[in-house]
Image: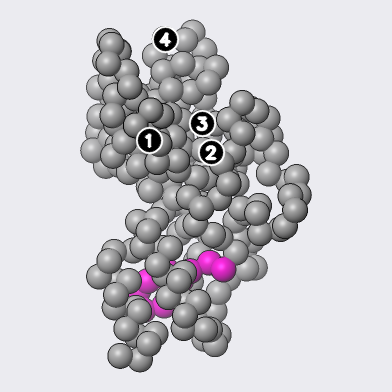
Amino acid sequence: MGLFNSIEIDPNVIPYIQKGEGVGIVKIDGMGKCSAKLENNAIILDPYESPQQSQIISLEEINFLSYDEGNFINEPKINIGTSGKHYVLAGVDDNDDELKRFYNTILNIKENSRIPKYQNGMPQPNTHVTNPNKQPQLQHNNMDFNPSVNNSTEQSQPHLLNNDDVIDGQDKMDPVAEIRRYFELKEDGIITEEEFTKKKKQLLGL
């Protein structure tokens, strides 16, 4: 839990933390303790103790994103996958809320970038994307992450929408399925409880 951590947070990261666009300290395999922030459509990881140079992860290159809530023993983690690379950003010093806000910011940017059409001022659910928190846990000891490898079912591989995979608001959809997808948007922090309730009543014709 980092009770004896003496590293001070980089003051330049504090404004990013306040906006949910940064984390003061995360632990990353091979890099040690780093700061993380969103800048110029990329995640920048700056090591505190390692002589390594900063790592830059372009948001456009991210093809897997999930959040592990952690427990009493293990800190929460953000899993980020790019082509051939897997990053695990682990929280320290009980910065769970800080890390979760950072994850939600990244997820929100990714969701908005892949769902260009809106209906009634709300982002439309993506049938190709499941709740990343419900995906099977990654093998953290393998840093060579390859999301292109097929598993037993195609649905087990999280993936993003192509530009052509846009949901048309005029299509006829099952209200129950729509409510489930809006519930996942609420769980991921994309929409509020009030917005979810309003949309549910609308879909049920109440």
Going 75% across and 45% down the picture, which residue do you hit? 149
Distance of label 3 from label 2 (alpha carbons): 6 Å
Identify the residue at the far bottom of this view: 205
Viewer-proximal residue among 39 and 157: 157
Q: Is residue 113 left or right of residue 102?
A: right
Distance of label 1 from label 3 (alpha carbons): 16 Å
Residue 200 is situated, as x and y percent measured from the top left of the image, at: 35, 79
* Helix, strand or loop under label 2: strand
Foreground: disc 1 or disc 2: 1
Q: State the mark number for residue 49.
A: 4
N-terminal of the two: label 4 or label 3?
Answer: 4
Question: For mark 3, what is the residue?
Answer: 88
Q: Is residue 85 left or right of residue 26?
A: right
Quadrant the C terminus occupies: bottom left
Mark 1: which amino acid? Asn
Contact, CB < 8 Å: mark 1 with mark 4?
A: no
Please provide the residue range marked out in magenta: 118-127
* 151 relative to 130, above or below: above
Mark 4: which amino acid? Glu
Going 34% across and 31% down the picture, which residue do you hit? 72
N-terminal of the two: label 1 or label 3?
Answer: 1
Mark 3: which amino acid? Val
Identify the residue at the far front of this view: 72
Q: Is residue 53 visible?
A: no
Contact, CB < 8 Å: mark 3 with mark 2?
A: yes
* Helix, strand or loop under label 4: loop
* Helix, strand or loop under label 1: loop
Residue 171 is situated, as x and y percent measured from the top left of the image, at: 55, 85
